[in-house]
Image (spheres, helix red, strand yellow):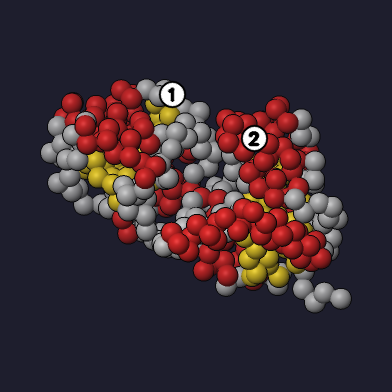
């Protein structure tokens, strides 16, 4: 007989991005409530040591790149792909099925295929959807749809995500709970800032189409044309210039001669001290249901500029936390930046609004209780 309730978390990785960071806090909450935690993820990442403190980890894919010597790495990869991979995954499935967890908690739509690899299991399943229409269809794709039929309940983080589940995947609305993401800064810093000689605009997120990294170069270029680079500067936090996948982006950055107005800040475990230096945050995501970075900077009283229709950030803006621009309009984004830069009273008002919004609507304690209620609703122990 089990002494503790057990929850199996399924996720994509342990990188320092929104979904894994939120899952870490959710797991901490359930462990504090007396649950025994297990983790089944596609790949590891920088947060893996934090997860290990909470429970047993099962990795679907092993990382051989940590072995720098080719004579070691290549044979291991060959053996893995030849036969060990299937055996590894079969024994993981056997172990996790034998758990008979009280709840399986899938974190993100892309984890649906990992859920399907465990079938048949009789544990109830909740899936937390942090994606919107385009990413669900073209990035998650089959990985998402493979798991849908095994899910008993969904959590959507914004109205657009919920509408997508109902419209595109025929999921009944009564199976979907609407619960926003939560901010994770518990100590609120003063909103009043000393006016610096250089107006600092910050953004963050892994490079890619969804996050609008390509558009940042255009925004910086247009800003430089209008006002030079003497009293305004952009900072992109978490961008690895040494990553081979960013070669073409680095080439554009150098060709456009933007080093005096745009600076890249390497990935860090704790970006909050860097964020606290910014006067404005820039969200160029084409789709981002409820970005954690907006809540992190918002908790510090930093207003946001974003595109219309990008996700829940639009609700924050409509409530006075910043300004928005038409979809992909670089000129309107730059207009909004200069409006908040030059209008101190407006920026101060937006600062107070966004900090208040994060503290209330996106309150961590309240939202964790809402998530627990959704889990309790399907749990074997309910």
Q: From the viewer's side, name the closer residue of 291 and 221.
A: 221
Say above or below: 259 vs 6.
above
Residue depicted at 35% across the width and 31% down the height: 215
Quarter of the view holding residue 305: top left
Q: Which mark is residue 327?
A: 1
98 above or below 246?
below
Name the quadrant of the C terminus: bottom right
**Residue count near mark 1 (Cα–Cα under 10 Å), binned few <14, some 14–19, many ≥20:** some
In the image, 54 versus 311, the foreground residue is 54
Q: Of the numbered discs in the image, which one, if any, rests on residue 141? A: 2
Q: Quadrant of the N terminus?
A: bottom right
Drawn side of residue 303 relative to residue 371, left or right: left
**Percent x, y of residue 213:** 38, 36
Identify the residue at image location x=72%, y=37%. Answer: 145
Q: Is residue 245 above or below residue 65?
A: above
Please count the marks in the image: 2
| Mark 2 or 1: the one toward you | 2
Image quarter of residue 321: top left
Residue 163 at what x, y percent from top left? 67, 31
Task: Tell me, for residue 146, which label it has, or none.
Answer: none
Q: Is residue 349 visible?
A: no
Q: Tell me what residue is drawn at x 71 percent, y 27 percent.
A: 167
Where residue 345 appears, as percent x and y from the top left, is: 28, 39
Task: Find residue 115 and report its horizontal and vertical position in percent.
Answer: 73, 50
Which secondary structure lies at badge 1?
Answer: loop
Q: CA distance from mark 2 to mark 1?
A: 24 Å
- Badge 2, how many Cα within 10 Å: few under 14, some, many 20+? some
Asked whether 295 or 120 is in front, the reply is: 120
Name the N-terminal-most of marks 2 and 1: 2
């Amino acid at each position: 007989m089990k002494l503790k309730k057990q929850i199996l978390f399924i996720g994509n990785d342990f990188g320092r991005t929104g979904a894994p960071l939120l899952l870490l806090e959710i797991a901490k909450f359930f462990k504090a409530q007396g649950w025994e935690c297990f983790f089944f993820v596609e790949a590891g990442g920088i947060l893996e040591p934090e997860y290990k403190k909470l429970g047993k980890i099962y990795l679907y894919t092993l990382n051989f790149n940590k072995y720098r010597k080719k004579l070691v790495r290549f044979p291991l990869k060959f053996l893995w792909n030849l036969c060990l991979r299937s055996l590894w995954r079969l024994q993981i499935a056997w172990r996790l099925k034998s758990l008979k967890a009280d709840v399986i908690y899938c974190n993100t739509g892309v984890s649906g295929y990992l859920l399907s690899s465990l079938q048949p299991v009789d544990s109830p399943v909740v899936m937390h959807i942090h994606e919107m229409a385009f990413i669900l269809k073209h990035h998650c794709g089959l990985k998402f749809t493979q798991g849908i039929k095994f899910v008993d309940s969904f959590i959507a983080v914004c109205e657009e995500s919920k509408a997508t589940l109902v419209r595109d995947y025929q999921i009944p609305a009564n199976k979907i709970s609407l619960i926003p993401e939560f901010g994770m800064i518990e100590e609120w810093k003063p909103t009043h800032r000393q006016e610096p000689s250089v107006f600092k605009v910050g953004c963050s997120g892994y490079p890619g189409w969804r996050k609008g990294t390509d558009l940042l170069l255009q925004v910086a270029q247009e800003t430089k044309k209008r006002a030079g680079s003497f009293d305004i500067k952009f900072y992109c936090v978490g961008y690895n210039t040494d990553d081979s996948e960013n070669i073409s982006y680095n080439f554009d950055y150098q060709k456009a001669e933007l080093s005096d107005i745009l600076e890249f800040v390497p990935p860090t475990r704790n970006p909050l001290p860097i964020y606290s230096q910014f006067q404005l945050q820039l969200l160029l995501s084409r789709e981002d249901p409820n970005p954690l970075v907006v809540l992190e900077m918002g908790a510090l009283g930093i207003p946001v500029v974003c595109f219309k229709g990008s996700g829940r950030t639009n609700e924050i803006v409509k409530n006075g936390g910043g300004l928005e621009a038409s979809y992909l309009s670089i000129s309107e984004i730059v207009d909004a930046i200069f409006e908040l830069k030059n209008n101190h009273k407006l920026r101060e008002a937006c600062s107070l609004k966004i900090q208040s919004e994060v503290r209330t609507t996106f309150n961590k304690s309240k939202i964790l209780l809402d998530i627990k209620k959704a889990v309790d609703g399907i749990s074997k122990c309910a």
